Image (cartoon, grey):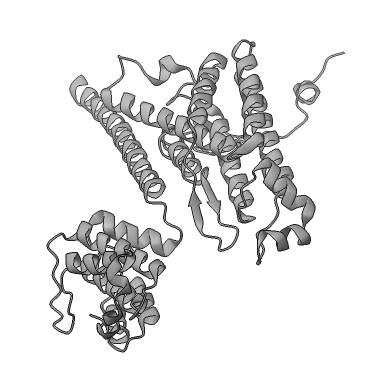
Amino acid sequence: MNRPAKKRILGIETIVSMKEKYIHILSIAIVAAGFVFVAFLYSTEPRSFAEVASKSQVAIGTYEIDRAQFDRGLAAFRADQFVEARAAFDRADPEKRDAAAQFYTAYSLYRQGWGRFSSDDALFKSGVEAVNRVLEIDPNFRSSDTTLSLRSPIELRTELEEGLRITTSDFNPLRFTRERK
Amino acid sequence: MKQTAEQKAADFVDAEIIPLEKGTLGPHAPAESRPKDSRGVKDYVILPLLFLAVTLLGGLRFGAADNAFLFIKPDLICLVYSAILLLLFVRAGLVRLNSWLDEDFALLRNVANAGILLTLFAASTQVFNSVLPEQGIAFWVVAFFFFWTLWNNLFAEFDARKLLRSVGAMFALAFVAKYLVLANLTAAPADGGWLARIFENPGKETLTWLLDLPRYGRSSGYVQFFALSLFLLGLYLTPARIGEKS
């Protein structure tokens, strides 16, 4: 006679302990997820909600550049509108994670800063930084754009560093005849 | 002088007794009638969420020029102060450690309780991060007073209620010092060079430079007020013995 009652009581006890167990698991999950989210925000330091989204995409590996903005940047680059081109590349790749976008950014800095007699040091320095980012992202990057004379980041960096250095060849009057690459 | 039963009842009862429905919540409900699950949800879900929100918001400031997010990581001193504060909570009985962590408890329960204590520690660290000035002489002055107060409290006899009041008053004063007094002494960023700024606002510009005050957006104060309120609410809801009625 007592068996079913005992079973029932045991059944209720089991339900209560299961509920507690689930609450404990939920609590642990909330704490773990919360700390991961806070650590992510404080380590990546996004400056806006848009950056929170793009940095989250980088963290979970789904980051992709905005292809339309990249094409717009490429068109501006080919039309020698370098400031517009860089703005479009920045919009296309806000996290500076795409080798091609960073390569074109560096190239636009080179072309804008290039001068027949002297180059713009500030732009060239920014160009070296951009090309270094390309090498960090993909050390074996090589552009497939046949319209460019310098297709690898190493070649571009050499050209930029050459422009920053003052050598005796800088005073060679024949420099007037050199061409932008 | 015989009294009827009704007269006797009238001497003692001056109000109508309204029976509570089963399961009634709130302060009018008898503690025994509160469902255990609601306590569990409050302790294991709401409390960590509150403390995590404080952990997130405590270091958040806004740029003065563009209102961009600025996440300020806590200084080492904030961790030290937070550890002392937790020690105070245990000493005053706000948190009875032996009912939070015990070898007789199931592993899951111990881990969940430890997680909540961790969120309390993180939130305390971020509240210190929030109310301590970031740099300069103001940082050293406020940090010294925090240390002085916490050190004195370590050797004082407290109960949980008095400690809560003391902690609330300490953080409220520090908040007023930083987000009302010092923020009003800080010059807002203006267009033009430093010379133009000095001519426009010589007093504030000099104090900003002398006290090395950072220029943040005004919304920083609002967010930190919210974070501090959440922290104090979290402390108020923290049970001395978790999973039991406090």
Residue ID at (28%, 64%): A161
From this viewpoint, which residue is outermost toward the right?
Answer: B1
Position of residue B165 measured from the top left corner of the image (x, y, whole percent) = 67, 27
Q: Note whether B230 is above or below A89 in the view shown.
A: above
Drawn side of residue A8 relative to residue B76, left or right: left
Q: Note whether B194 is above or below A118 in the view shown.
A: above
Q: Is residue B138 visible?
A: yes
Q: Is residue B20 visible?
A: no
Position of residue A31 measured from the top left corner of the image (x, y, whole percent) = 36, 38
Q: Nearer the viewer, residue A161 or A126?
A: A161
Position of residue B239 measured from the top left corner of the image (x, y, whole percent) = 50, 26
Position of residue B2 measured from the top left corner of the image (x, y, whole percent) = 83, 14
Q: Note whether B6 is above or below A71 in the view shown.
A: above
Drawn side of residue B147 relative to residue B186, left or right: left
Residue ID at (50%, 24%): B80
Residue ID at (41%, 14%): B98
Q: Note whether A101 is above or below B199 in the view shown.
A: below
- Marker count (numbered): 0
Q: Quadrant of the C terminus of chain A?
A: bottom left
Q: Quadrant of residue A56?
A: bottom left
Q: Nearer the viewer, residue B99 or B16?
A: B99
Q: Quadrant of the N terminus of chain A?
A: top left
Q: Quadrant of residue B102?
A: top left
Q: Quadrant of residue B217?
A: bottom right
Drawn side of residue B189 relative to residue A6, left or right: right
Q: Nearer the viewer, residue A117 or A3?
A: A117
